[in-house]
Image: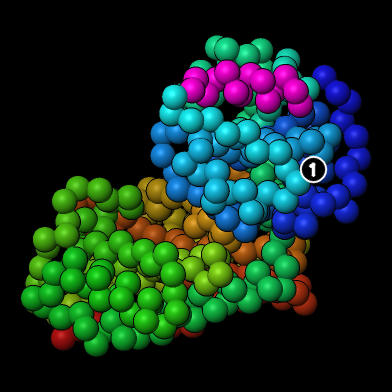
Amino acid sequence: MMPAAEYDIKRKDYDRMNTKYAEQIMKKLLGTGTDAVFISPSNDLRLLLGFSPFVCERFQGLFFTADGRHFYICNRLSADEIRPHLGDIPLYVWSDCDRYLDLVETALTRHGLINGRIGVLYHAPGSWLMEIADRCPVTWVSFYKHMNESRIIKNAQELENLRQASQITDRAWEDLLGYIRPGRSVSDISDFLKGRMQEYGGRSMGCHAYEKKAAGYPHYVMPKISHVMEETDSLLVDFGCTVNGYYSDCTRTVFLGEVTDKEKELYELVRKANLTAEESLMLGAVCSDVDAAARNVIEEGGYGEYFTTRLGHGIGINGHEAPDISAVNEIRLQRGMSFTIEPGIYIPGVIGIRIEDVCIINEDGLPEVLNKTSKELTVIS
């Protein structure tokens, strides 16, 4: 192996890279004794190079190396697209008539990575990694945590992207409140909301809408789109979009028709947990303490066993990233961190209630709740 060395960030290939992100990745490689990290097509690649190609079963990706001799391997179908984004970074191209492992072995050998430690991220297909390991003596190591840490602190422009994305979700939600009514299908409601977010400038729109019983399963995947809202019902809507590649993520729960006293009690517990956690936010607050602030409210209300998730997750170029706001995360909140606060009560087959906002610690070290729509009990009649 070639010894890891400090990398001159003024080299030409950095002209095509996100310098801040590249510097952070380099520090993580050098600090962990990792010789390279393999970055397959993903939001991580897009943030680094400004582009990420179409994903299919054909092997491709960037080997970002600790000695600065980065290289990219892809099938010829992607070569013309990726080449303008690489600058002086060597591009190794294989075709469908080749065995891609022959080229991978050649590139790894040429760049001193045989017998090396190469970091991998969660989006790299396991089949690629196993095939390469069978052919070449390399050691794959998890680099997901380190990659997340490389972009955990957002700069002023990134924070502004997050603000704008949340403003779009808020505006779309206000429109949706006038659209929800008995007789509307969950599918129509979801399509309406995504359409509004797109109209207001959002991209990569997503929406998960769950009627009362389905919402009792936090990651419900059973058939649900045919459900038609009833005269007495509830609806949990988890939705978001991107601005310049940065995500928003908001959840609101509303009721149709009559609301029982028990449902009012559950909703108020979740709302109080959300507000209590957000009031605890400050520069230097420990993530586990923020989680406890919300969890204690629901536990004291007698429903702790139904708060089955962490309180929140980081958000940025991915919908979920660092930092987790959870009982086991002891890191402290810093300027530039962005994350969700989303307590919930989930009673399977009965009801689910969640209230979610994106929050940041801003440039001045102050907490900001980016979602501004009402969290008071909303009943649509």
Estimate the x, y position of residue 323 in percent, counting from the top left: 62, 53
Magenta: main secondary structure equals helix
Residue at x 54% of width, y 79% of height: 164
Estimate the x, y position of residue 103 in percent, counting from the top left: 60, 23
Q: Quadrant of residue 143?
A: top right
Q: Quadrant of the C terminus?
A: bottom left
| Above/below status of 26 relative to 98 | below
Q: Is residue 216 left or right of residue 335?
A: left
Q: Nearer the viewer, residue 192 or 45?
A: 45
Q: Nearer the viewer, residue 258 or 185?
A: 185
| Above/below status of 128 relative to 138 | below
Q: Is residue 293 visible?
A: no
Estimate the x, y position of residue 45 in percent, counting from the top left: 60, 49
Residues in magenta? Answer: 98-111
Q: Does the stretch in magenta take in 101?
A: yes
Q: Does the stretch in magenta take in 321?
A: no
